[in-house]
Amino acid sequence: MKILIADAFDKGLPKRLEKFGEVFDDAGRVAEADVILVRSKTKADRAYIDRATNVKLFIRGGVGMDNIDQPYCKEKGIQAMNTPEASSVAVAELAMALMIALPSRLIEGHNGIVAGKFLKSELKRTELYQKTLGLIGVGRIGTEVAKRAQAFGMKVVAADKVIERHPIAAIKPLDEVLAESDYLSLHTPLTDETKGMINRQTIAKMKKGAIVINTGRGKCVVEEDIVEALNSGQLGGYGTDVWYKDEIYGSPIVGAPNTVVMPHLGASSKENLLRIGDIVVDILEKRASK
């Protein structure tokens, strides 16, 4: 078995995978690989899959599978898997960090001190306590966010196309969640239905001054509409870890008011990479035993 590690995983993973065969990270050898490990950077589209002439299995280290052309994999008899259970805690903690940073004015306070300004009277905080958190998607990650929000004394509501009952969140129609939420946190995969779902029309249904947190998928929001709402005050803040592209590309979000932005680090904790490695090893062990 030849295993290509196409993206960044735990540094100890190659050694752990040597028992299954040859492990390499040379993208130029993609045609040799039986198994290809990707995260979010590699786009396994039709062209990439056509170059991977020997691949039998893609393993996506993480949750979202939108960077792998799953229908084309199925057509070619290639199995595509992910590690959804690994990333829940890491992403949930970052969502909460963004949710805390915006109303606590952490960025402005820090930058003010660094610039020699003590903004004690200029910056005003608000609390999470007794505020309503709306979750768009309440699967593994959304549930971990709900647990943490509950610990802060927040009321939690959620819109989910699949889940009808939840131990923490009250499941409601999307429009009700939008209308009730002081904070809205996105935890949905990117599909035709969710692409651009947070836009001028849906933002208009939200409370004035609500804060949106996005650790799901960048393309679930219309960036220009987010900026417009931030400038008008319809949105009180936007915290994001996800983008249209995982690179600097001139997003209008950068430099917009009342934002906290991160370079897609949600699933990049040391602990999560170890968990992903454990699952990858388990998948390959089961495959080797067949």
Image (spheres, rainbow, N blue to C red):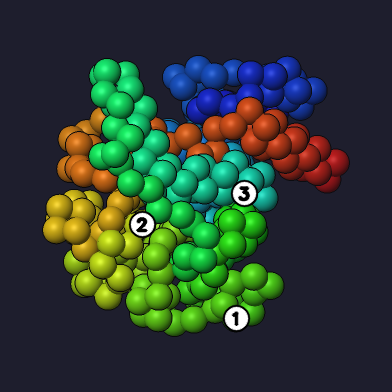
Which quarter of the image is occupied by the C terminus? top right
User: In the drawing, what numbered circle is on residue 212?
Assistant: 2
Mark 3: give few (<14), some (14-19) or many (20+) Cα within 10 Å.
many
- Per the image, label 1 sits on a secondary structure element best described as loop
Q: Residue at 64% of width from left, 32% of height from top?
A: 273
Residue 64 appearing in the image: yes
User: In the drawing, what numbered circle is on residue 261?
Assistant: none
User: In the drawing, what numbered circle is on residue 164?
Assistant: 1
Q: Who is closer to the viewer here, 154 or 112? A: 112
Residue 235 in percent (x, y) is at: 26, 59
Q: CA distance from mark 1 to mark 3?
A: 20 Å
User: Is there a contact, CB below 8 Å, between mark 2 and mark 3?
Assistant: no
Counting labels gives: 3
Position of 282 with respect to 142 (left or right) is right
Disc 3 designates what residue? 88
State whether residue 191 is above or below residue 52: below
Report the mark closest to the observer, 2 or 1.
2
Q: Residue at 70% of width from left, 37% of height from top?
A: 275
